Amino acid sequence: MNDAAPRTPIWSQPERGARGPAPAHSRDEIVAAAIAIAAADGLAAVSMRAVAARLNTGAGSLYRYLSSRDDLLDLMADRATAGLRPYPEPDGPWMTTMLAVARAQLRLYRDHPWLLDLLNRPTAIGPESLAWFDHCLRILQPVRVTATAKFEAIAMMIGVVSLFARNEAAAPAPSFAGMDMTAYPHLTALFAAPQPESPVVPRDLFEVTLRSVLSGLLEETALLEETALLEETA
């Protein structure tokens, strides 16, 4: 059981401590320096000492602005999330707009691959992230499902986008060339079978996957919930 007190979100803390000399840097400058380090050398290279060195100051001075490295990571994530603006406007089918939101998020991960390393850590949600979630819920207003179902769909969308972003950054898939496939009859049959010609328009696996996930979680859920309601009132 973890009895540790919850961490106060950095956005609820003052810009700097009340004690000590006049500030030599702003919180924005500190975050910008940290993002520059992450862009060059990865998230693991971001430390209070490394950020302080980039700003030509001592690591201890940064604690006038931040309580911990976790605060710094939260600020970095929220600053990068601002790159999702301007949001796609919901002026058509909700699915089309959500796909546009997902593509913007994929571009964000391409521009800031270090963000992927922040997805699985407990974090305080900042104002930019809250604005993004709020916009997603605005898009999903026409979908008649519970709030829980909508949040599940948004979470799954984030998961799919991050999966595609990670796969783009991963090493090439292994090749089966030159391997003895005798002991693997299904693989042998698959490679031996004549392959159909590639379609003129290549399939967009990103869109196909997201459409399947979102429609399954939202459209099918809406139908099930509507059916359940009708059964209750019958």
Image (cartoon, rainbow, N blue to C red):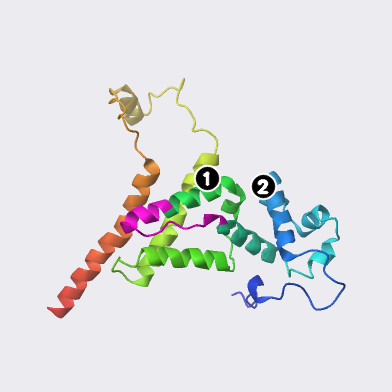
Res 39 label: 2
Where 18 falls versus 101 (above or below)?
A: below
Residue 152 image offset from top left, x and y in percent: 40, 64
Residue located at (51% from left, 45% from top): 165
Judge left or right: residue 113 versus residue 65. Answer: left
- Indicate the position of residue 170 as horizontal and vertical percent values: 54, 39
Say if 63 sits above or below 49 in the image: below
**Residue 5 visible in the shown view:** yes
Left or right of 76, for residue 29: right
Give the magenta-colored segment's residue range: 83-100
Quadrant placement of the C terminus:
bottom left
> In the displayed structure, would residue 145 be above or below residue 162?
below
In terms of image quadrants, where is residue 230? bottom left
> Mark 1: which amino acid?
Arg
Displayed quadrant of residue 68 = bottom right
The CA span between labels 1 and 2 is 16 Å
**N-terminal of the two: label 1 or label 2?**
2
Which residue matches tag 1? 166
Reply yes or no: does residue 99 show up in magenta: yes
- Residue 66: x %, y % from top left: 74, 68
